[in-house]
Image (cartoon, rainbow, N blue to C red):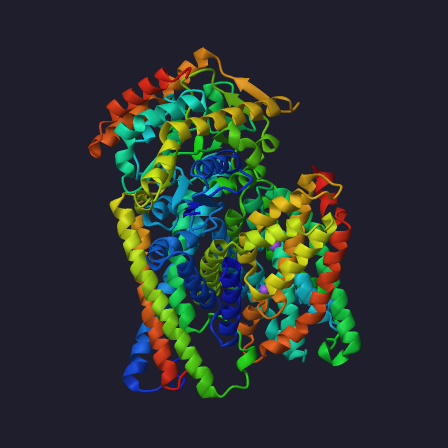
Amino acid sequence: MSGAGVALTGFLGMLVLLGLRMPIGLAMLTVGSLGYVHFTSLPIFMNYLKTTPYHLFANYTLSVIPLFILMGALAEKSGLSTALFRAAAAFLGHRRGGLGMALIGACTGFGAICGSSVATTATFGRATLPEFKRYNYDPGFATGMIAVGGTLGILIPPSVILVVYAITTQQNIAKLFMAALIPGLMAAVFYCVVIAIVVRLRPEAGPALPRIGWAERLSVAVTVWPVMLIAIIVVGGIYGGIFTPTEGASVGCIAMLAVGLLQGTLGWAEIKQSIIQTAETSAMIFMILLGAEVFNGFLALSQLPDMAAQMVAQSGLPGYGVIVALLIFYIILGGVMDELAMILLTLPIFFPIVTALDLGMPADDIAIWFGILVLMVVGIGLTAPPIGLNVFVISAIARDVPITRTYRGVLPFVMADVVRLALVVAFPALALWLVNWLT
Amino acid sequence: PQVTLRMHHFLPPVANAHARFLLPWSKKVEAESGGRIKIDIFPAMQLGGAPPQLFDQARDGVADIVWTLPGNTPGRFPSVEAMELPFIAGKRGVTNSRAMAELAPTHFVKEFSEVHTLCLWAHDHGLIHSNKPVRSLDDMKGLKLRFPTRQAGEALRALGATAIGMPVPQVPEALAQGVIDGAVVPWEVVPSLRLHELVRNHTEFPGSPTLYTATFILAMNKPKYEGLPADLKKVIDDNSGMVAAVMAGAMWDERGTAVAEMVKARPRNTIIQLSADEVAKWRTATKPVEEAWIKSMKERNIDGQKLVDDVRAAVAKNMNA
Amino acid sequence: MTSNEHDGAGPARAAVDRVGAIARTLAIFGGALMLVTAVMVTLSVGGRWALRSAIPGDFELVQIATAVAVFSFLPLCQLGRGNVFVDTFTLRAPDWFNRSLDMLWDLVYAGFAWLIAWRLALGAYDAISSKTSSMVLAFPIGWAIAACAVMAAFLGLVTLLTMMKLGRGGR
Ligand code: NA
Ligand code: NA
């Protein structure tokens, strides 16, 4: 069998294992290991394992993940993310679906201090699910909105995915962050529009809350000042040139801890709970990263990505045709594999192809624009079935909602994502305008 | 092909080291073997692991050939640090690479005995790229600079700078955000890190010896090498040692010159040349680094003084080669 | 994992409880390590900003702490069945079938955990004997790898216990 044949068999085998309830990280690890051994040998694989798990977990870029999760957990336990949500709900809750829009608003604000979609999903899953339940929101609609809202964690800069893209393709992270801003805010607006349409069609999915007077609205709004302050410190610090995302996350953690201690909302019990939550979510993500690392090695050895790249190069498609084909390929691939693994694996091959395309704009612009497109398909992949990490995260929190109902809830948002993607493909200026204006 | 070799390294395929050294070197080996050797290059750590593991991957056969820096695993290969000490290396990559290749069999290869060393070399002169101009020793005070190797870090500290250690991929971001004021690297790396866009000032040292260099190794799995038939072994041998070192050194020199020209042509970038008198002050300031290193080598039963002397002599001998 | 669930015979349950307590303590230790790291980074950032001098080796300390912390998190995650899986296709399958599958995957996971523990132990030995150390502080990273190996071995034990618990009718 050819290398590509083995790789495709591996993919298929992994899908079967996943269907049979095997944890996703373990499935990638198992198939990846078998494939690795197939293309090399057992002793070589054994040697590969000697330090790989350690060095993978000791990656500086990845260290933002537990830190942002810890920051989110501290924010949640000290009641800050709930305050953010309540404040947004005070202004939007009286509309049908308003609580959902408040969630999107809160996720957008949180996305500006958090670079991880999983952390955002987990934070708002815990903070808002009880509220959605209390006001009789359709459970699948609610979990779907949280899974989608969670993608704002990466769609709104700072973003772990953009950091990885920048490293792999040697692009300027600050420029990528700037480019992501308009498409990210578009996402938040589009999600609110989708919510409005869904509740128009099914009013029982998102009941309205009692209207709240302005005095009370303002008094609720005042409670979010610590979040605002920390967001300004963290975002201001990252953009204003004081620290890296990992450092921003560290400072954010400490600031959150300080606020909670001073307000008396964080005690030893809450800190302990925050740590336990951070431990469980981080461990889950890093297990998947480990599986992806091994699976990645297997795919590279099979040379399947090389063959795919050659097929694209020889297809004779026009420039935009290649971009569209790649994005469709990414959406399909993102459906069945981990997004981080997906971009780590394919970018080294696709990136040179893409930047060499004749699209009537400079290669540097293509590089930034393509990064935003990749970010957007990653966002889709995080929520689209069968493997949407955000959906898994919310399912782990809302264990009484079947995963299929969440996927049904996610679907209209995915359609909005595809429309937004088409817009940014058709109008690169949506990503590039701010970058070119500011630099 | 009769033999397929997997070559693994950490840089992306657009990097000079990949496109202008490893790829042509591999093609040369393939051609000279009459197509009996095929080398598949896996860039960007595609086979898994992190850069510090590359050496072990070659030792253990996870990859057949790796390109890495001995400095990726600090403390493990102390002898090559003699080349990385402040004001030892020459200005040109060819000089430093020839010196490394000459000394390798007698001075260095022993520490790399777990692999078959194809080639050891070192890049051209490294320089200081910073957002504040560095014209004299005083300008170094408190400057936050990302250092490339442990010994270069010691040197920067001795010069009064704040030496900051961080992985290379973090550098552009850290610079854009003012986390660091600059980075110390050779010209070749500048475009890939977009240093010329992120900082305005580039401080060069006139002539030799220069501030620092970093050493590289191209290592092959030992059983894989020894298992080759004699004629294929010869093809590998013919492209090892001095042959490969000169290829690599010339690439760094050629790119270094081209990048320096490119940066010079940018109206807002300034290339600062330190005067010979100024450099003398810098050499005095970094002398203790060399002495401390020699002393620390004594604890490991290595004659550091002899290494330093021999490296200096080899650099001097190859100055115009 | 709450201990008031029905999870089978006394001694096994006691063992699960004891191991569970260790896993919790370990994870809290790891989380505390992350918090200490965050404090260290904050001080370093503050120092760099105000005094122009960072804590030496802050980047590599973050790296080492993250690896050790993540390994300390893994057992607790398994104990709480936090490793996500797809249940879409087995929703209507009988309980004994799903339970058997979960036990099988636990066994595979335990196998990998011990494999990784064994290989990391060798990797740690290599790193210690070759004197590989961190760039700035010259911290011998072999000891960090060794700690990860021990925690991976513990993860295998935890996973075996969660499998036995499933076998006895627990969750
Ligand atoms: Na974000
Ligand atoms: Na996906």
Image quarter for ligand 1 equals: bottom right
Q: Picture coordinates of residue A121 (x, y %)?
A: 58, 65
Q: Is the C terminus of chain A in the top left, top right, bottom left or bottom right quadrant? A: top right
Q: Picture coordinates of residue B37 (x, y %)?
A: 42, 43
Residue situated in front as seen by the camera: A61 or A363: A363
Asked if residue B25 is positioned above or below residue B280 in the image, the reply reads: below
Residue situated in front as seen by the camera: C66 or A319: A319
Q: Is residue B68 left or right of residue A213?
A: left
Asked if residue A43 is positioned above or below residue A179 in the image, the reply reads: below
Q: Residue at x 39, y 64 (%)?
A: C27
Q: Picture coordinates of residue B236 (x, y %)?
A: 37, 37
Q: Is residue A260 visible?
A: no
Picture quarter containing residue A204?
A: bottom right
Q: Residue at x 58, y 79 (%)?
A: A402
Q: Picture coordinates of residue C158 (x, y %)?
A: 34, 72
Asked if residue A92 is positioned above or below residue A433 in the image, the reply reads: below
Q: Residue at x 47, y 29 (%)?
A: B142
